[in-house]
Image (cartoon, rainbow, N blue to C red):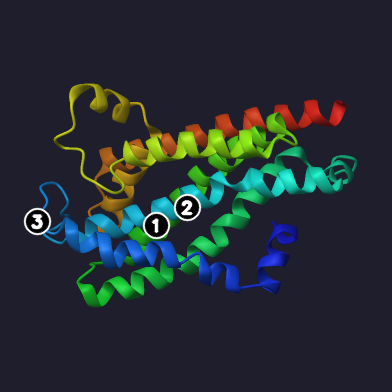
Amino acid sequence: MVRELRPTVRDPFTVIFSLVQPLILLALFGPLLDGVPGATEGGNVWNWFIPGVLAMIAIFGTSMTGSNLLAEMQQGSHERMLVTPLSRSALLIGRALKEMVPLAAQAVVIVLIGLPLGFGLNLLGAAIGIVLLGVFGIGLGAFSYTLALACKEQDWVFWTVQQTMMFPMLILSGTMLPLDGAPTWMRVLVDVNPLAYVVDAERTLFAGEFDGATIGAGVLAAFLVAVVGIGVGVRAVSSASRR
């Protein structure tokens, strides 16, 4: 994680620039949700929308973990990492955690912007929510790492699969729009989307409601993605190192 963070520390402008998209969403998309059925949390659209924006940042950040790996494989540095005594799981978790550090900084900025708009915040719930996003992001980052290993030098395959998976996952999680009136076939897909449970838990935590069932489902979904992702990723890295 320290190795991956060094370029970010040397060039912090990348973290600032990555805030442009979520800030545009807050300014242009958030007000459109005011009065939309289902897009309220405690009577405030920002309590519903801002946790979803934070989840979106985390998902896009960690899902692109493999893009850095693709560059390293082309440069030959990844092969040098494989011959070190570094734990294979550290290669996966460290890269994903690197994406969560900028997320924490961006979350602070977005929350501070949301407070004057009426965004209600529970500090304990927000802290737990960020940790939960981190756990989910570790698993997603591991899957991204595995995808990069499978694609190797075919960058276009990585980006095609990554984009094809991410947008449906976001839409079917209720991150941007409420899904209360979704058709039955879409509700079935929502029910098997782990991100949907994480997003519901985020909204509950940030609001300080601490609904056991909602939070429990989110925690279970996040840990399942993390465990499966790390398991698949470690196996892929081990296979790559033997080759």
Amino acid type of the residue that numbered disc 1 sits on in the rendered structure: Leu
Which quadrant of the view contains residue 92? top right
Towards the viewer: 221 or 9: 9
> Residue 243 has which mark?
none
Q: Earlier in the sequence, mark 3 or mark 1?
A: 3
Amino acid beneath label 3: Gly
Give the mark nearest the N terminus, 2 or 3.
Answer: 3
Q: How far across and how far down the image is residue 162, in percent?
A: 54, 38
Residue occupying the point 39% across, 62% down: 22
In the picture of the structure, the residue carrying the numbered disc 2 is 58
- Pick the front one: 87 or 159: 159
Residue 227 seen in the current view: yes
Per the rendering, the mark at residue 54 is 1
Query: Which residue is located at x 54 percent, y 40 percent?
Result: 140
**Which of the numbered marks, if any, corresponds to residue 35?**
3
The answer for how far apart the CA atoms under marks 1 and 2 are is 6 Å
- Which quarter of the picture shows residue 91? top right
C-beta proximity under 8 Å, tags 1 and 2: yes
- Determine whether, in the image, residue 212 is placed left or right of residue 160: left
Q: Position of residue 84 (x, y in %)?
A: 89, 44
Mark 3 Cα shell of 10 Å, populated few (<14), some (14-19), many (≥20): few
Q: Residue furthest front?
A: 156
C-beta proximity under 8 Å, tags 2 and 3: no
Total marks shown come to 3
Is residue 127 or residue 234 the one in the foreground? 234
Circle 2 — which element? helix
Q: Residue at x 37, y 69 (%)?
A: 110
Q: Is residue 211 left or right of residue 195?
A: left
Tell me which amino acid carries mark 2: Ala
Quarter of image, res 78: top right
